[in-house]
Amino acid sequence: MLSVEGLSKHYKDHQVLTDVSFGVGKSEIVGLVGQSGSGKSTIAKCLLGLERPGGGRMLWHGHSLGERAVRRRARHDMQAVFQDPRSSLNPRWTIRQLLSEPLDNWFPREGAAERRKRLVRLLDRVALTAELLDRHPYELSTGQCQRVCIARALAPEPELLVLDEPLSALDVSVQARLIELLLDLHRTSGISYLLITHDFAVVSDICQRIVVLDQGRVVEEGVVETVLTSPSHAYTLALLRDVLPMPFGV
Amino acid sequence: MSDRVLRRFSGSLRRDPVGILLLAIVIIIAAAVMAAPLISSLSPVATDFKQVLLPPNAVNWLGTDDFGRDVFIRLLYGGRTSLMVAAIAVVIVMSIGVTVGVVAGYFGGVVDLVVTKVIDVLLAFPRLVLAIAVAALMGGGMVPLVIAISVVAWPAYARIIRGFTLQVSQEGYVSAARCLGTPTWRILTGHIALNLIGPILVLAMLDIGNLILAVSALSFLGLGVPPPAPEWGAMLNEGRGSMEIAPWLVLAPGLAIFVVVLAANYFGDIVRDSVEGRPVHGPRNWLRLPSRKRYKSVAVASGNSAASPASALDLQGLCIEVTDRRSPFFGKRILNDVSLNVGRGESVGLIGESGSGKSTLAALALGLTRPPLALTAGRARLFGQDAAQWSWDDWQQVRGRTVSLVNQDPLSALNPVLRVGDQIREVMLTHLDMPRAAVEDRLREVLDEVHLPERVIRQFPHELSGGMRQRAVIAMAIVNKPALLIADEPTTALDVSTQIRILDLLRDLQDRYGLALLFVSHDLRVVARVADRVVIMRSGEVVESGPTAKVFTAATHPYTRELVTAMPGRRLQTVKAA
Amino acid sequence: MLAYALRRAFAGLSVLLGITVVVFLILRFIPGDPATAVLLTMVEPGLDSAQITQRDIADVRDQMGLNDPLPQQYATWLGRVLTGNLGTSLRSRQPIADELATRIPATLKLGGAALLVMFLIAIPSGILGGLYAGRSTDHVSRVLSLVGESMPSFFLGVLLIYLFAIKLGWLPAMGGRRPESIILPAITLGVGIAAATSRLLRASLLDTLSQPYMLMAEAKGMKRSTLLFRYALRPALIPVLTSASLVAGGLLGGAAVVETVFAWPGVGRYMIEAISGRDYPVIQGFTLLMAMLFVIINFVVDILYRFLDPRVRVEERGNV
């Protein structure tokens, strides 16, 4: 569905990405793992059209994302959730306005009743109640804000969600519930995820395939079990060794 | 404008008699200036040489000038010119500034480059000098005055608004909107402009006063409307010659300018505070605390008297509440009946999610509980001594000597303008009476213990990586060989591989020094690696405590069980084990 | 460091070039024909435009090079400026560069004295305001700043003259002959810029006081004096220094007004006199001089800032 071929990018003389290639298939969950400075967020920005890639190709269903028409289609098919849920929500808008933004863009001719039904359904998918519609983001907890972000990303009914560190700003118990939610959504709708994170533990819980990134290069790619049990690259091995073990085998 | 801002604005105005008075004066002045022809039939320009330099009287409320013209009516008509020029200038300057700033900031590229260069050049002139030059070369008068002020003032606005725009464009919600397929014009109006209204309003309000001052300065210099038409600055200039016998000629226009500008600036402040929100409290401030020493030998007594059997830290039934009435959270209990014991040489993990009160507890152990928070009940003992009664100076001897702290963000924990070596040295020099050579020896020794190279002595915090900074902070904490170390989320801001190394270093140091360690974190796996015993907190209360292994494997409280099962990485574990 | 200084100097030069373009163009904005304007000033007063013949105008235009294309006029003018030739005053017929040179020391002296006044007011008021934020000391400091920045400098100057020169007779009101005559103008100029600096210092101090390293320093057991000077004030003074360009702008701009009020024999008053005499080349020369001074001051501040704040040094190195 999505394939990235030889993507590279540099700021001035600092090379951020070098020849990055990977793909995401239909209904697949792919994890993109790297430490800070590995260039993982830059990949997300390039995919989402927030930054121009320096070289290489990004294909959406076999068509280059560099073409306007393809990008326009991908604007609908590919949605994103970012790390900081609070800054992702315009503080002056209500939840209703926030969720209506993508609906105005993609379903502009909807009637009021239909719109209301759609909003409630969206909130329901992320386990929030319709009472929140007229609140502002600052009246919600961080976990609720992230759910609103997910609902907003689901609104155009995309095929792929790019999740850029969606759990890092959250408490552990909230994290666990969101992971549940993401897996549920995947099971019911077959949506694909590209999960970008520094946390091997989270990746191993959610993903089917892993891409390991070190200083802008893909050092390893493969099925979760394979990468975790027999990593082929020393860097992956070192990263895995540094993941804190589950205490007392709980 | 959002309701919050309006509420704050009306709230602060209601509590502010000076503000209301100024508002009233300005409204009266503005009304009088508008209605000048209705108030008095006297002409502002008609001369009468029989009535020169009359002091204030029943007909001429503010006296007359040296042409026998009524000062009061000239003041009213003069205000029309001064205030109108300033008002027009504000509108022109804001329109140009906002348009240019937003366009340059959002689109960037060549447009931005050219605009920035032009702004740079125009800002390289002292504001008033360029205004004088432009007005002078255009020959004075109302239109040149407006042009001069506008030419000089717009670049500063454009630059600031360009900065705001850049900042807002980086916000998550703008990226999100682009990803959602929102058209550019919607992003510019709905997201960027909407969030710029506050700062722009503040900017305009804060600068109106300056513009009025600039207008009157130019007219004082003879660059305003040509005489005999009145204008505040020009009236003041004309009055200077007769000041000795007729001071009202200077006082009337001078006070008029002063009061109007004062009111504008004052409102600027109120608007800014309403938009940006002002904290009820100043930052924590050691200057306000009682200074006298109560206990002479606190540090010595609690220090290294290992013979004493008392615990390092012993808290019983502790309550901390918001005790400041001005705080919106007045009366809220941050800690409720908390008991916690850290034995000598013991490592205790304190686990809690955000809002659990764990950091408040850590601060208490260092005597850093500050308004609006205060200890309202319970007992706090450090090495057997009742620490609840200690004054700031008592604590000062203990902190860094007997008890020390490592906190979350190593970058902001270090003073950016001091070299790392100096920051470690001063901990020794403050607390211990050591010869210079011994200080240097210990400095090298402690750097070695935390695995830092000697070159960091001469380096500034910004020159170190995150892991190295945290090692430097740890070096500061252990250099005096304290008996109790408080570590508040010490690894949260670090990369995974750095995290594990810092944890092992802390564990290693704890063994070597026989340190008592209170390790505060939200991450169970991190705590499990260092703690002998754990305490779980939620919403200011201790829900469970016990030996680490027992709490993790056989938790009794449902919340603890939830936390344990919430730990991610279960699959990783099974895979690794296989 | 040297590489940085050179790069800043280069940037400064490009701004200077921009300044010359602006100053050159300003003179072209004069309503009407520059040549006619010049003739009106030079010829005996009492003549009006009707008595100037077309041939006179054509002659002057030719002399002034006004018939050349604009870029060529600019190049000629810039060439003269670069050799220190700012043209001749229309009134005194003296070289403008010389006239400015004899008056600039008085202006610099006044600026220096005003700077001293500013520091004496702004530093204590800003520090007290920051340390005692929200208390009565802070309120007093805030009210003083507010009054200071709302007071028109010419009004304050006139009031001071009235009180100290006319009523009390303690200090001279005008001129610059006696050493104590600098006191009143320096206070007038200093008070205006003190308010902004005091506010900035207060805000900057509040910012450093709420930084985590302040808490960390307290947790290290630092004494009060160390906390105050090494941890709170030292970082807080850096933004105050960078605001020096603001202060310099206020000083240079305010000088024209204050020198007029006190008849101080500096360049500002010279320029204001030139305005009433329509001495355009003088206005042009003065503007150029002030802008150049301003650019130089900003350059020095830039270098100093880098020297004082280690953070900037590192960022620069990272970006190269």
Image: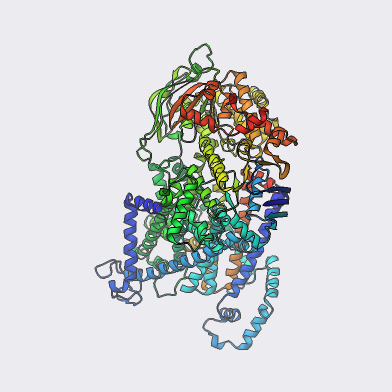
Residue B355: image x %, image y %? 46, 35
Q: Can residue B19 be seen in this view?
A: yes
Specify the farthest residue to the top: B307
Q: Is residue B331 left or right of residue C229?
A: left
Q: Where is residue B285 in the image (x, y as percent from the top left)?
A: 45, 36
**From the viewer's perspective, is residue B326 above or below residue A48?**
above
**Considering only vertical position in the picture, is B227 above or below C123?**
below
How many numbered marks appear? 0
The answer to which of A87 and A211 lies nearer the viewer is: A211
Snapshot colouring? rainbow
Q: Where residue B342 appears, x then y in whole percent? A: 50, 20
- From the image, which quarter does the C terminus of chain A lie in? top right
- Residue at image x 66%, y 45%? A40
Residue C152 seen in render: no
Viewer-nearest residue: A219 or B203: A219
Looking at the image, which residue sits at the far left? B58
Identify whether B429 is placed above or below A128: above
Q: Where is residue C67 in the image (x, y as percent from the top left)?
A: 67, 81
- Give the residue furthest to the front: A188
Asked if A25 appears above or below B207 in the picture, the reply is above
Q: Which residue is drawn at 49% across and 68% down?
A: B92
Quarter of the view holding residue B511: top right
Comparing B568 with C182, the one in front is B568
